[in-house]
Amino acid sequence: MTQPPSNQPPGFGAPNPDPAQNAPQNPAPNAPQGPPPMPPQAPPMPPQAPPVPPQAPQAPQAPQTPPPAAPGPYDQAPQPGYGYPQQQPPTQPGYGYPQQPGPYGQQPGPYGQPNAYGQQPDPYGQQPNPYGGGYPTQPPAPAPGGKNPFKGKPGVVIGAAVAAALVIGGGTWFALSGDGEEKPIAKPTATSGTPKPSESVDQGDGTGDGGGRNGEDDLNAGRQQGEAKIDWLLKNNVDLPRNGADVFGPWVSGDVVAKAMYKGISGFGLADGAPKWNLDVPFEVCAAAPEPAADGTLVIAINDKAGDRADCNVLQQINLKTGKAGWKKSLDKGTGFSSFSDITLAISGTTVTAAGMNHSWGFALADGKQLFGKPAEGQCQPYAFAGGSKLIAAAACRTGDVNKPQEQVSEVDPQTGKPKWTFKLKPTWEVDKVYSVDPLVVSAQQRDEKKWTVFAVTADGKLRSQIEGGTDKYAPDCGGGTFVVFGRNLQGCNGVTADANTFYMATDSEYRQANAVVAFDLNTGKQKWRAAAPAERTITPLRMEGSEVVVYMKALYDKGGAVATIAPTGGSPKILQQHPLSTAEIEDDYYSPAYLYSGGHFVVAAGRVSAQNDAEEKETKTMMSFSK
């Protein structure tokens, strides 16, 4: 990937933003099982090298599909997207962003030199993607592995490939138990002679043969010396709708791991999987903040009623450590094109944001008091936020030309919503994902041209670099669960992480073909090193732990997964935790899985749960944990 374009087409071929406008402003498929027959439909939006748009007036734009690299306003040759076709944001008013020349509508930067992919920079960002194709390819959809959540279920279910919970408010919907509560079906310990009873799994006494390849008789019975133990395994105990339901989470807060699904959110002991608390809500959970606040406070969104006409506009605060529900409030959805059916949430410090088509708000996390925001007004309107140590807004701008929509990214004050600086992308480039908030690393794309780019922005809003992807294909895993129609989840991707000066991204890989983690210098966008996965394995960066990159090597039907680290200088992955071969099929049996590594515990959870009938529904595995 090359540096984000300033006035050129977005990177991996995306245009670079205009430096002048960047000035701060004020105001693997699992082997044995295939993907669920009817998984939530998710727009395939592989990361493509989006151009780094020149900073311009704030204008939120909605669609999320990384565009291929194009010459950026930074006078860099556009480079093909990171394998994500760069697409342009929809021109429909429904996205709440009139498609007009975006804030990055700057003239193609001087990219008259061949890009990092060996291609001539296209001033308009129309260049082959750096991933070896004429156009950057989008990140592959979640690899099959686990039952199709939509199998045998007619009906339309919208899923997503790029992005992602619930709580209930004020005690009104609060319940300590209910139909939505899940219980660990297995809390195996090879030495335990009195395992807890399970409704559907014989946990064994630790002396059996592991129940064959799926290891369900006693999950730890087939464990070999040196292999991690299975702490617990959960099976579904929720009566789901015909088309199944998305899963939000998992999140860890203290000794609790929690997840939300359908009409409830539950907390379990991280060490033993024992139920800690459960909250039932009146209607389906429709959105959730990617991460809770440091004190364990989370905010989720719930539909305002049952049925297809429901709006995702009820916010609920909850404490993940205790399961206690706090404030709740309904958002004004507006009317006509000003209304919305989807929102995305993000938490930064003591603020939680909610954003959707033509709407964006900020609320005090403690009491729900509105801090800023209202229906769209003015030229540019934030349509999504990324939270964490900083609050980043993606906005679309009305430019007067529906064929040249323009977007921008800004760091905003969590207390007021006012931009500290604004960085505009080139017209027709849209923000796809925020891979890292601090340092800021953004994925952008041009949908129509199928171009994608990744670029880094400095702490004061200037283009830092555009990642030079080279000839590799990249496939950040942004999930296959929730897809918002008029909003965009900016966070929630596996396969990417960053530290102060380096961005790490995994290359794409076909089944049984090893991939690699590539480290890029954030100051130059150039590749520093690549660490290859062991033969036939797929390696996925999860997060940083100190100066090392924590990665997960996915399980195969004949190989257990593993947690490993890669040194800051590269080299072979160092195994921290090798998962048992005896439970590899179970580990590999989750649809659109989410991974979490915390305190030595590795948790894998399904991104969506569905089944053909009640019996199968109760046998569906939803989450499991490993530890040394």
Image (spheres, rainbow, N blue to C red):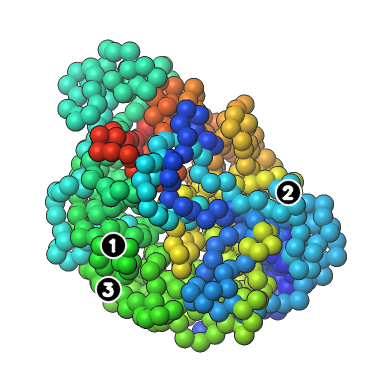
Tell me: 301 left or right of 346: left
The residue to which callout 3 is attached is: 330
Q: Where is residue 433 in the image (x, y as percent from the top left)?
A: 54, 60
The relative height of residue 52 versus residue 207 in the rendered view (above or below) is: below
User: Do we see residue 553 in this rendering?
Assistant: yes
**Label 1, label 3: how many angstroms apart (C-alpha)?**
18 Å
Give the numbered dot on residue 307: 1
Q: Is mark 1 on a helix, strand or loop?
A: loop
Q: Nearer the viewer, mark 2 or mark 1?
A: 1
Return the residue nearer the eye: 145 or 472: 145
Quarter of the image for the C terminus: give it: top left
Q: Nearer the viewer, mark 3 or mark 2?
A: 2
Q: Classify residue 364 by image quadrant.
A: bottom left
Sequence-earlier tag: 3 or 2:
2
- Mark 2 is surrounded, within 10 Å at the Cα level, by few (under 14), some (14 to 19) or many (20 or more) other residues, namely some
- Mark 1 is surrounded, within 10 Å at the Cα level, by few (under 14), some (14 to 19) or many (20 or more) other residues, namely few
The residue to which callout 2 is attached is: 133
Q: Is mark 2 on a helix, strand or loop?
A: loop
Q: Answer whether labels 2 and 1 touch (C-beta < 8 Å).
A: no
As shown in the figure, which amino acid type bears the numbered disc 2?
Gly
